[in-house]
């Protein structure tokens, strides 16, 4: 195994969808995935479109950038729907709408302001008073005062999606090295040489181009080529309840507190939204923090009291990637054949779109969106 | 036993005894099919001890109640649970809380699990003057060896084993061990603290040292038909009779590997069941096993004699004993379940039609809390499971975290008793408490040595290759909860060299309510064999909180509906 047209570093949603477009255009592609966090395909499956209040609160300095990126999100959700049709598989995509709920008049006013700004940016968003909300979302508890509805938001089943893409790649002849770490990247002739380590064994391979789609690991890979991309791994807590009859139709969030809730096709309710998990041991294995379980689920039953009767059966830690709130997408400064592909906030929603744009860049085509401000050169 | 009460199940009125589990009352009335699955099947009680989650029913409108764990109450209205589950009832929400708002309960020593090992550890530490708090998930502590009936049942102990359990518990209570029954420990925070729910509230329990004595659950050996209502573990059958004085029918067949099967056959025969056959995978009387039998006589002649007497009693009771035989498949037929016996390697044998089938293939340690805390475990091919690495005093690789009994390596109840005493006294010494005059761990160490030698010989006598997935056919479900077939699982495992986590995400195996307890060890063993992946802590599903499903309103201390 030596020469490939493109080496894709990272086998998560971005890397897989980039590889998909490249392979369809006849490129020989190899995906190398570290698999260390088993986090690359540990996704929760929300399709986010409206600005998440968690980011507005945690990173107020990033709000301007978030707003500038906003048009990407409906495009990201649309790309998911196209992808479902292309794969010919049921990914359980539901454009069921997303509700960001408010507990009181103050939070409602905050959402109304956010809603007005988002409408100006072209989102299909509306404010719902209590009575109207109770009609479309009868599962919400008495404590909910009102909500912002984002019509295009929704959810999908990440297990089905990731598996459908993986098997499609396999059929297209895309090679994949799992549990393999890239230990060095260096320019070699017209391409790039990568040193790989797999269960203690070393090997090399060369590729004409490289796409860095390794989420929070992207910074480390870029550094091997002398480029700074300040990706930070943010391990987050996710809870899963036992299955129940259809109860929660929307993607549910809160105006002020960290939570996302959605019910997937199998009937289980997935509850997350930014409560911290942590890394443990020398290999930085992501593990859950039971304190997050209490805070997160307590909030969930406050918003949807019926959840109180269900049992939580699983928790897991997903690894989110943060930089400055925007995508890091474009040619690496000083390297014409290396591209970074890191989605901004809500990486799974944007994943297939960012993967498609990265593949377009590698093939010298127009990515279809203005990505100038996403350049990795911005970190100097 | 005390007077009858009545419940309704699917509009049928059923009598029950106070103190019985709902599952036992239903089984005694012939109601073995308790829930529907998404795949269109029916399930019944399988493990009988709160692990498998297959006996879920809706009780007075509240869904997801384990029939094996809920006590009957007069007038209960019980329904089969639909798939994917009933809509949960309306309730009043509670204000959100944080971890910091939880109540904290402190003690010198925390013991998790009230079986032989846990009770013994608690008693030893308490006898040195320490404040000991014991949490047990059952309504009546005693664990799977002593299987104590609920006090409300007012049942006389059946035999010495049950009397010993009652006596041990009484000694603990008399000595001042604080026993909290019905407490589900669902998360370990550090070497001295856990979170548990009790009576609808969650608290943090903190101590200076902790003993994990969470025992074991029965190992799965999937065969065609093993998910049918009426097919249960041998332990479940034993619990039905010993703890609840109920039988799941008259005609019973017991199959598997290990000494428990014959014991339970005799117990249920004495209770009036017609045990038509007992199939034991090991060829017990093969000449090669004579050495092991001799060593058992040397180390515990009384227990060996008990074993021989059990065989004689089973034969006298009319059971046919089949050595070197396994149950190859079960199907639902007119009037019951048809079981086919045969050899483990193939061939068809005799068929029996029965009301219930018990399958017992040994145990799997319940070591989730230990693994979650980072205690080291090594795979032991002798027990085909992870064994907790411990010092001679039963301390794990995490300081002040002790572990005793089957949770750390399947040694049996007599060994668990000795280990509990050793751990309790070691903790007392560690915490600077004074042991009563004349008490030392030396005697317990000597007893433990004898029990371990006896147990090792017993393992050799009963040694038989694990059938693992070999008795299942392509359509047999390996993951009971998410209904993943053997064919689907084998295909996913053969595609590349996936980790157990990747297999889980590809197939959903292990994502259900039992949290992968039955399919997980089977998948790990298969991947190890096919890809050379090491059988270590990482080979199994990650042990994450909650280590048992926990109701959200209990978790956050909310009000009742």
Image (cartoon, coloured by chain):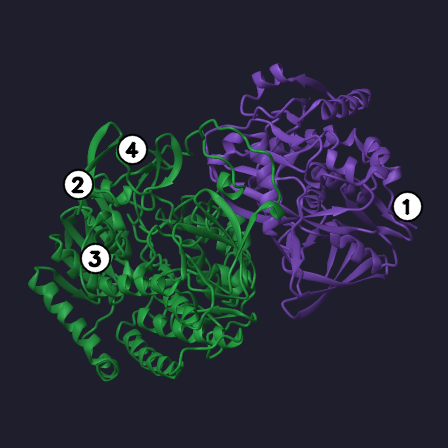
Chain colours: A purple, B green
Task: Identify the secondary structure beneath mark 3.
Answer: strand
Q: Do the CB atoms of the residues marked 1 and 4 lie less than 8 Å apart?
A: no
- Residue linked to disc 2: B3
Residue A72 position within the rendered picture, expressed as x and y whole percent measured from the top left: 77, 32
- Snapshot quadrant of residue A190: bottom right
- Work out how far the residue at label 1 is from the one at label 3, CA to CA, in angstroms: 71 Å
- Work out how far the residue at label 1 is from the one at label 4, CA to CA, in angstroms: 67 Å
The answer to whether residue B38 of the structure is visible from this angle is no
* Residue that appears at 12% across and 55% down: B276
- Residue linked to disc 4: B76
- Residue linked to disc 3: B254
Q: Nearer the viewer, mark 2 or mark 4?
A: 2
Chain at numbered mark 1 = A
For the residues beneath circles 1 and 3, the answer to whether they share a chain is: no
- Residue linked to disc 1: A378
For the residues beneath circles 2 and 3, the answer to whether they share a chain is: yes
- Work out how far the residue at label 1 is from the one at label 2, CA to CA, in angstroms: 80 Å
- Work out how far the residue at label 2 is from the one at label 3, CA to CA, in angstroms: 31 Å
The answer to whether residue B512 of the structure is visible from this angle is yes
Q: Do the CB atoms of the residues marked 4 and 3 lie less than 8 Å apart?
A: no
């Amino acid at each position: 195994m030596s020469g490939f047209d493109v080496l894709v570093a990272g086998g998560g949603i971005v890397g897989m969808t980039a590889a998909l477009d490249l392979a369809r255009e006849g490129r020989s592609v190899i995906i190398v995935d570290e698999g260390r966090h088993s986090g690359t395909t540990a996704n929760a499956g929300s399709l986010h479109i409206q600005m998440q209040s968690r980011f507005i609160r945690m990173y107020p300095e990033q709000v301007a950038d978030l707003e500038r990126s906003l048009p990407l999100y409906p495009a990201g959700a649309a790309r998911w729907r196209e992808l479902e049709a292309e794969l010919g598989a049921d990914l359980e995509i539901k454009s069921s709408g997303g509700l960001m709920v408010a507990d009181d008049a103050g939070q409602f006013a905050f959402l109304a302001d956010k809603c007005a700004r988002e409408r100006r940016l072209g989102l299909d968003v509306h404010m719902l008073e209590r009575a109207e909300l109770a009609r479309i979302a009868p599962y919400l508890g008495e404590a909910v005062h009102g909500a912002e509805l984002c019509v295009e938001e929704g959810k999908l089943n990440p297990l089905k999606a990731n598996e459908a893409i993986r098997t499609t790649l396999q059929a297209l002849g895309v090679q994949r090295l799992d549990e393999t770490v890239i230990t060095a990247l260096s320019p070699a002739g017209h391409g790039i040489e990568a040193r790989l380590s797999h269960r203690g064994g070393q090997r090399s391979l060369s590729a004409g181009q490289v796409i860095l789609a390794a989420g929070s690991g992207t910074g480390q890979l870029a550094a091997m080529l002398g480029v700074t991309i300040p990706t930070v791994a943010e391990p987050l807590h996710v809870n899963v309840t036992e299955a129940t009859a259809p109860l929660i139709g929307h993607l549910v969030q809160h105006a002020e507190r960290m939570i996302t809730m959605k019910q997937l096709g199998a009937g289980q309710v997935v509850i997350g939204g930014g409560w911290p998990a942590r890394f443990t041991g020398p290999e930085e294995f992501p593990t859950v923090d039971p304190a997050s379980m209490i805070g997160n689920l307590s909030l969930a039953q406050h918003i949807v009291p019926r959840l109180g009767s269900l049992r939580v059966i699983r928790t897991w830690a997903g690894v989110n990637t943060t930089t400055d709130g925007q995508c890091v997408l474009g040619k690496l400064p000083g390297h014409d054949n290396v591209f970074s592909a890191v989605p901004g906030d809500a990486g799974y929603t944007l994943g297939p779109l960012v993967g498609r744009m990265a593949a377009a860049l590698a093939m010298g085509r127009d990515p279809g969106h203005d990505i100038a401000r996403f350049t990795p050169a911005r970190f100097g | 036993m005390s007077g009858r009460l009545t419940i309704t199940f699917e509009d049928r009125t059923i009598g029950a005894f106070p103190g019985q589990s709902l599952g036992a009352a239903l089984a005694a009335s012939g109601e073995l099919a308790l829930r529907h699955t998404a795949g269109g099947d029916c399930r019944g009680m399988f493990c009988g001890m709160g692990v498998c989650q297959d006996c879920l029913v809706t009780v007075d409108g509240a869904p997801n109640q384990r029939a094996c764990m809920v006590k009957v109450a007069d007038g209960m209205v019980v329904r089969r649970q639909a798939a994917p589950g009933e809509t949960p009832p309306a309730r009043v929400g509670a204000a959100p809380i944080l971890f910091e708002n939880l109540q904290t309960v402190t003690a010198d020593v925390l013991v998790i699990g009230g079986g032989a090992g846990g009770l013994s550890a608690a008693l030893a530490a308490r006898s040195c003057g320490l404040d000991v708090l014991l949490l047990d998930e059952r309504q009546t502590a005693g664990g799977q060896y002593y299987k104590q009936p609920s006090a409300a049942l007012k049942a006389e102990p059946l035999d010495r084993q049950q009397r010993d359990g009652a006596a041990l518990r009484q000694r603990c209570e008399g000595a001042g061990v604080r026993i909290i029954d019905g407490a589900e420990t669902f998360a370990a925070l550090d070497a001295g603290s856990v979170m548990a729910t009790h009576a609808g509230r969650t608290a943090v329990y903190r101590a200076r040292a902790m003993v994990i004595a969470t025992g074991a659950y029965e190992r799965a050996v999937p065969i065609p038909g093993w998910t049918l209502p009426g097919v249960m573990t041998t332990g479940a059958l034993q619990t039905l009779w010993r703890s609840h004085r109920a039988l799941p029918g008259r005609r019973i067949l017991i199959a598997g590997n290990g000494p428990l099967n014959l014991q339970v056959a005799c117990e249920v025969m004495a209770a009036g069941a017609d045990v038509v056959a007992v199939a034991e995978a090991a060829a017990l009387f093969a000449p090669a096993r004579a050495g092991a039998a001799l060593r058992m006589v040397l180390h515990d002649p009384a227990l060996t004699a008990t074993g021989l007497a059990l065989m004689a009693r089973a034969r006298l009771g009319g059971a046919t004993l089949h050595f070197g035989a396994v149950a190859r498949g079960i199907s639902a037929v007119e009037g019951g379940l048809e079981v086919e016996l045969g050899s483990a390697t193939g061939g068809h044998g005799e068929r029996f039609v029965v009301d219930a089938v018990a399958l017992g293939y040994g145990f799997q340690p319940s070591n989730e809390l230990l693994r979650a805390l980072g205690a080291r475990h090594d795979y032991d091919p002798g027990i085909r499971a992870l064994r907790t690495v411990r010092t001679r005093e039963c301390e794990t690789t995490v300081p002040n975290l002790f572990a005793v009994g089957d949770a750390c390596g399947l040694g049996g109840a007599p060994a668990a008793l000795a280990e509990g005493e050793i751990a309790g006294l070691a903790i007392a010494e560690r915490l600077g408490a004074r042991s009563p005059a004349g008490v030392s761990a030396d005697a317990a160490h000597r007893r433990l040595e004898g029990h371990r030698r006896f147990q090792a010989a017993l393992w050799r006598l009963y040694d038989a290759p694990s059938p693992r997935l070999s008795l299942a056919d392509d359509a047999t479900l390996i993951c009971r909860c998410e209904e993943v077939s053997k064919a689907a699982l084998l295909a996913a495992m053969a595609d590349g060299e996936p980790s157990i986590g990747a297999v889980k995400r590809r197939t959903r195996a292990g994502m259900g309510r039992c949290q992968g307890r039955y399919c997980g060890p089977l998948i790990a063993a298969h991947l190890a064999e096919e890809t050379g992946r090491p059988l270590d802590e990482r080979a199994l599903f990650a042990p994450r909180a909650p280590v048992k499903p926990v109701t959200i309103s209990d978790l956050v201390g909310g009000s009742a509906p």
